[in-house]
Amino acid sequence: GAQNARWVAAALWTCRLPRQFSVSAVFRGREGYPFVQTVLTPDRGALSATHVMVGRYASERYPDVYQLDVSFDRAFRLRTLTIVPTITLFSVTNSSVVLARQPVQNSASANQATAIAVPRTIRLDLKVTW
């Protein structure tokens, strides 16, 4: 189906804390895309089969999607070296939101989830400069 959202929001926050600590966060949200349900018509010979929409376009939508990523780091100085370990948590608020479903209503897999939001992920980085 078409992927459009009538609203999208994003916010970025960063803060330098005492003792060379930093914390930052990125929040993103958007309206759920339309869930366009169809039925597949029987094969009509030369005209073949076709998908017919059930209901009006965008009368049903997937749930709104919200994502929060948070990052923590601290700089260490060791003579001429600066070492910055970073921990980043992606998709902190993940609730396994369904992003796509099988739209063909007269198929055996009708409405089965085909895509969900990415799972929570942790990334560890180490930046060294001299």
Image (tube, rainbow, N blue to C red):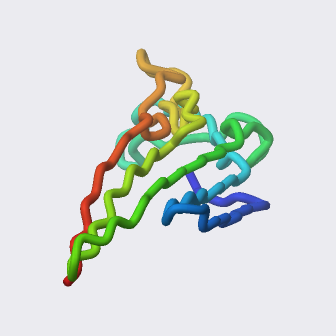
Residue 86 in the image: above or below residue 128: above
Residue at 52 percent across and 29 percent down: it is 96
Residue 35, image x and y in percent? 64, 40
Q: Which of 50 and 76 lies nearest the eye of the viewer? A: 76
Question: 13 or 45, which is in the foreground?
Answer: 13
Count of marks placed on residues: 0
Seen in the image, is 57 located left or right of residue 97?
right
Q: Camera-side residue: 126 or 70?
A: 126
Image coordinates for residue 111, horizontal then vertical, percent: 54, 23
Residue found at x 31% / y 71%: 77
Is 108 placed above or below 28 here? Answer: above
Which residue is found at the position 58% from the left and 28% from the top? 95
> Residue 109 appears at what percent x and percent y?
42, 19
In the image, residue 105 sits, relative to residue 35, either above or below, namely: above
Name the quadrant containing residue 99. top right
Left or right side of 110 for 77: left
Q: Viewer-proximal residue, 48 or 36?
A: 36
Residue 123 at x, y percent in the picture: 32, 48
The C terminus: image quadrant: bottom left
Outermost residue toward the front in this view: 79
Residue at 36 percent across and 42 percent down: it is 122
